[in-house]
Image: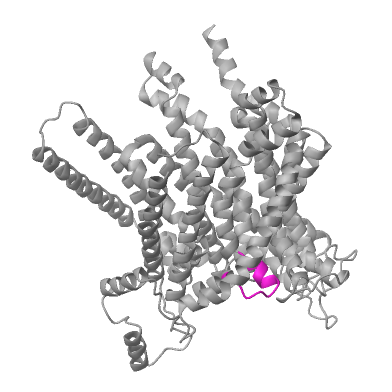
Amino acid sequence: MAESTETVQGTSLWRDAWKRLLKNKLAVFGLVVLIVMIIAVTIGPQILRMTTGYTADYIPSEGDLIKSLPPSAEHPMGTDEAGRDLLARVLQGGRISLMVGIISTIVSLIVGVSYGAIAGFLGGRVDNVMMRIVDIIYAIPYILIVIVLLNVFGGTNTRTLVSWLPQIAASLVVIIAGSLASVVLFRRLFERRERIFRGVGDWLLRALFVVASIAVIGGLVYGVSYAIAGTNAGASLAEAYTANVNQGLSQIFLLFFALGLVSWLTMARVVRGQILSLKNQEFVMAARATGVSTFGIIFRHLVPNALGPVIVYATLTVPSVMLTEAFLSYLGLGVQAPYASWGSLASDGARNIAIFPWQLIFPGVTMALTLFSLNFLGDGLRDALDPQTRKF
Amino acid sequence: MLHFILKRLLIIIPMALLVVTVTWALIRVAPGNFYSTEKKLPAAVEANIRKKYGLDKPWYQQYGIMMLNIVKLDFGDSVRYPGQSVNEIIRRHLPYSATIGLLAYILALIVGLSAGIIAALKQNTFWDYGSMAVAMLGLSIPNFVLGPILVLIFALGLYWFPPARWGGLSALVLPVATLAAIYAAYIARLTRAGMLEIMRSDYIRTARAKGLDEKTVLLKHALRGGIIPVVSFTGPALAALLAGTVVVERVFSIPGLGNIFIQSVLNRDEPLILGIVAFLSILVMLFNLLVDISYGFLDPRIRYE
């Protein structure tokens, strides 16, 4: 008996959503196009090299003065200014465009979800301050932040950044866990009805608590990062990085971070709103009344319910990040030669639109088709996972 | 209501100053200078430059001086274009961006609202799917792809409009259309969702029940509530349109503010960056305030104390 209810309950939410998604023809279209696109950019370049011999960076040594050839049987998408096969470049560029979209979205997910969840979970004054910070970052043009990030960590500074990565990760974990613990403890100690001290004594105690917790968190951060640095993880990481990564790739890695770090704001708002509204709902109260532990409530009730909007928003972040990357490449700040992305290919093509229109049209259309599919998939997922707010 | 407006107006000032402070800190954190080039400057020249721009003072003094000047609305001279004040540069380039931005938003409103309303009224028909697919297409084509393609077809192919430059109404058509596409798509989607939600609400059923004809129900009752999401979108969108038109400005060689801003960031022209950021953040907050005020007129249930 208990077993059968368990299976029904466990599968119904996601299976239901999947069924609803399959009914949505446009979302299925998007999913199919996306799968085809991912397969094409993954194995396409190899197949092309084996069948025609063209690669993304193959420049023919002889030939006509004008190297830009229109589409033909040999070059289905024509060639670019240097005579490189455009199909090979579009396939290769797709790898980078999709990777930028996915990895930056993961970065924005990590930052946005933890930030939003903490703000929503703690609520009150902490939430207020954290959300005002988001408002202020919103008001700064993101292009400025991206350029500064690329500037600060570009060139030789990337190596330093990489060697710091273990420390940064350790500090983040300690800071998040430490501040959560200290705020929860603070609440337990001071925000009860019966206070230990009143008036000045209470304030003194509060100040002491804040100072002490800052000292403890600082000490923990220092200790943990020192322990990790002591094992030379950072140094060996940096060593491996410089040995394996060249300037162009380094720029692409930076782009992942920079784009992720400017696109977490909306995600944080979505998650915070979700947690805030879930926290006070009757089913949570009911669970609490029936004796489910706090841990159980968080993982059995809050997380699965907040997951839907997060997945939906993440799917919609991928195309928007890809558009931003294309925009940066158009400004000459994104992916640098010899690497290419759909954005950089299209912006190269945009300059030659009057004479060699195929150099814009093929990468542009490929990119638009992918974004189109991603957007439809995101819409379909929203309808499927979030029946209450679905767009009918 | 008056109290609410005054409070919001007063909050704009500290918020803008905070934004400027964070921006300033961001610029200062980045390595390099506006005067540093490939070649290393002689130490004496560098010292002179630093003295002239007050960079030899400690950072808190520089920050204080900058903030005092900004409170007086004096952003100083651009360091890249000596002798031109930031205020003057903004005043000179804003009209171009404002013209195409406003025209594009009006066009986007007309196209987006009508497409959204038609899609909502004929829900789940060919019109609905067709207009939503076109809207999605509008959201998926980067404007530096759309712009050149429009130029290729309408300027170089059909000779209907000039391909670039400023001057005359016909020169405005292509940039405005390029810029409007993505906003029209957004507005169409927001309108459709908003209308569908409102059409199912109780007060629409009441309006129908008391015998009003369909036209009145639709235009007087449903539309007012249905376009609230569009109104919320208008604040940030208008501000973005007034400045974020870089791509269109580049494609059509228009001397607007967006391009100036990108250039100033690339040149690390600190006074100009701060001036434009302050201007934009105030603009966004003002538009958002206007949007909040207009909610009260659109939906009588929304009240502010």
Residue A388, given in percent of the width and then of the height, sits at 59, 28
x then y, percent, for residue B295: 53, 42
> B4 and B50: which one is in front?
B4
Which residues make up the magenta segment? B245-257
- In this rendering, the answer to whether A389 lies above or below B168 is above
Q: How many marks?
A: 0
Residue plotted at (38% across, 35% down): A121
Which residue corresponds to the image point at 59% horizontal and 42% vertical from the top-left? B229
Q: Is A365 left or right of A217, judged from the image as shown?
A: right
Answer with left or right where residue A336 lies relative to residue A187.
Answer: right
Colouring mode (rainbow / by chain / secondary structure / one colour): one colour
Q: Position of residue B149 (x, y in %)?
A: 79, 65
Quarter of the view holding residue B17: bottom left
Q: Is residue A331 visible in this depiction of the protein?
A: no
Residue at figure coordinates x 11%, y 30% from the top left: A196
Quick check: is B252 in the magenta stretch?
yes
Q: Nearer the viewer, residue B121 or A271?
A: B121
Residue B300 appears left or right of B9: right
- Locate the C terminus of chain A by quadrant: top right
Q: Is residue A27 above or below residue B283?
A: above
